[in-house]
Image (cartoon, helix red, strand yellow):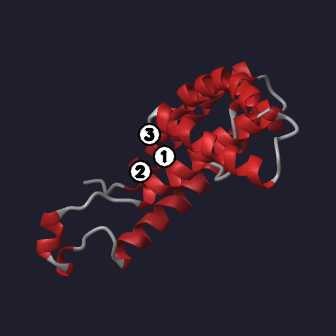
């Protein structure tokens, strides 16, 4: 049974891992290995999934999200920063955090002021749930093929809106 399941899922996993690996910054082989391990753990505890192909697609996306979260938290060791000491800890102090929070608030406020479907589309694209284009299209009630052009229009509109706000704030003289 396990051998048959592996034989059936191997081509699908190879294709899914190749398609998703770039977005997570990982190698397709590493992604495949993590999903195979997840399948073995599942077989040991719950038995085979009812819908193996659906389970595999969800497992790949879940593994990609986990990899992205891990990558964001991990930082390469920098010996020169260690030698500089804590006084040289720029970018992680309260000032940096306050400025980053203010930028996020300004961005979200600008997104809410966009016309039409743009606020919902950009919110779905930036969602921590990491929705696929298919899920976003279904949620918004539009075709999957129109998401890319719609996203481009919305980002262009957001860019113009933010440029106008920045220009209005700059001192004249």
Q: Nearer the viewer, residue 69 or 5?
A: 5
Which mark is nearer the camera, 1 or 3? 3
Quadrant for the C terminus in the image: bottom left
Element class at badge 3: loop
- Residue 32 on image: x %, y %: 56, 35
Q: How crowded is mark 3: few (under 14 residues within 10 Å), some or many (20 or more)?
A: few
CB within 8 Å, label 3 to label 2:
no
Specify the quadrant of the image occupied by residue 13: top right
Give the residue at x 16% y 78%: 85
Marks 3 and 2, how far apart in space? 33 Å
Q: Name the residue under label 3.
A: 25
Q: What's the CA distance linking mark 2 and mark 1?
A: 6 Å
Question: Is residue 88 visible to us here?
Answer: yes
Badge 2 vs badge 1, beta-carbon distance below 8 Å: yes
Real-space Cα separation, disc 1 to disc 3, in angstroms: 29 Å
- Labelled pair 1, 3 in contact (Cβ < 8 Å): no
The residue identified by callout 2 is 166
Q: Give the vertical position of 143 relative to 114 (above or below).
A: above
Residue at disc 1, secondary structure? helix
On residue 68, the disc is none
């Amino acid at each position: 049974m396990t051998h048959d399941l592996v034989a059936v899922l191997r081509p699908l996993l190879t294709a899914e891992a190749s398609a998703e690996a770039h977005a997570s910054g990982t190698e397709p082989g590493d992604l495949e290995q993590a999903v195979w391990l997840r399948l073995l753990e599942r077989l040991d505890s719950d038995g085979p999934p009812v819908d193996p192909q659906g389970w595999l697609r969800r497992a790949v996306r879940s593994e990609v999200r986990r990899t992205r979260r891990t990558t964001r938290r991990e930082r390469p060791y920098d010996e020169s920063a260690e030698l500089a000491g804590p006084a040289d800890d720029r970018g992680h102090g309260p000032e940096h955090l306050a400025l980053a929070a203010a930028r996020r608030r300004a961005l979200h406020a600008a997104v809410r002021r966009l016309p039409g479907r743009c606020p919902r589309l950009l919110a779905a694209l930036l969602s921590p749930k990491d929705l696929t284009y298919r899920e976003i299209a279904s949620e918004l009630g539009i075709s999957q093929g129109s998401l890319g052009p719609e996203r481009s229009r919305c980002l262009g509109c957001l860019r113009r809106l933010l440029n106008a706000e920045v220009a209005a704030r700059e001192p004249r003289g």
